[in-house]
Amino acid sequence: MEDVSDPPFRAVCKMNGADLMYTEFISSEGLIRDAMKSKQKLDIFEEERPVGIQIFGGDEEAMALSAKIVDTVNPDLLDINFGCPVKKVVTKGAGAGVLKDIALMERLTKACVRSTNLPVTIKTRLGWDFDCINILEVAERMQDVGVQAISIHGRTRSQLYKGEADWSYIAEVRNNPRINIPVFGNGDIDSPEKALEYKNRYGVDGIMIGRAAIGYPWIFNEIKHFFATGEHLPPPDIHARVAVIRKHVHFSVQWKGETLGILEMRRHYTNYLKGLPNIREYRTKLVTAKTLPEIDELLQEIVRVYDGFAFEPRMVEMEAMAYSCG
């Protein structure tokens, strides 16, 4: 997830039950040009493992060189993003743009597989549009060139993040007797009930969660607890929420520096504090605060004001959380 799945975000997801995480996607062209932002995205920490680094691009040589660069930082796997629907990525023949050219997808993937000792996985979509749903062919051909797992978002590129994800095509891939690699489903999972229902109905090997974790990393443990017991964990109280916000923002400042770390944290406050009555004033203060002590003081005040507040079980408005890419 571009500008979301950085080390501070991944840290709070890991501490709340995420099993496997990926970096935000990294431009292969940026990596081989030694672009500072792209190189920084290679940062991974031991406590995150297992963790994969995700790259994207439309040039075979650049992808091969990028795979070699990724090898040097020793992640647990290399993931290729063939799912991002954003125009600036697609017009470069990358992300979901390659769904119109499976032969190119095959060449790009093969270039990566040959250039790294890491397991290679891919993330993709059902197809370019409803007239070109080709995920069955894509899965077979990707497996044939050495991909070791596939994650499928249940929408086409033309849908972007609109409409409902259709997991029936993901089930067709999972039930294809030719497919023997793990198949992970993605799209619209925003509650423990839906996670269990989709896992049982569609038979996937695992579930990938993106947008629903933004500002709510507790979803991973909530799903795992529901799978194990059939019961819900209580929603995190204000103390738990502020503790995670504090960890997130402090790590963000540590990793990016105070100015950028505080600036890029602003996108998260709305979701972390969702459900609190009359929270707008504090949220405004948080997004305008310029120093870490200011933020810490505001967080302490929020705890005092909302101590004892009973949160309702969270209902995610997915269309309002269109941060993710892929």
Image (cartoon, helix red, strand yellow):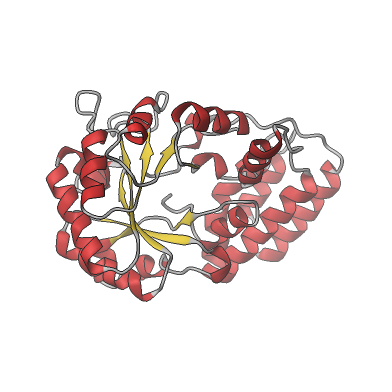
* 74 horizontally vs 262: left or right: left
Q: Is residue 291 above or below residue 137?
A: below
Q: Is residue 168 above or below residue 235?
A: above
Q: Say whether residue 174 is left or right of residue 228.
A: left
Image x and y of residue 305, in percent: 84, 44
Please indicate whether residue 218 sits to the left or right of residue 143 in the image.
Answer: right
Residue 97 visible in the shown view: no
Q: Quadrant of residue 212?
A: top right
Residue visible at 66% across and 32% down in the picture: 314
| Farthest-out residue, front | 177
The quadrant where residue 279 appears: top right
Q: Position of residue 155 (x, y in %)?
A: 35, 31
Residue at left offset 56%, top offset 44%? 213
Q: Residue at x 61, y 41 (%)?
A: 271
In the image, residue 141 sits, relative to residue 29, either above or below, namely above
- Camera-side residue: 314 or 144? 144
Image coords of residue 119 (percent x, y): 35, 61
Q: Residue at x 33, y 44 (%)?
A: 180
Q: Nearer the viewer, residue 179 or 131?
A: 179
Name the spot of residue 108 as percent of width and height, x first: 19, 55
Residue at the outermost bottom position: 72
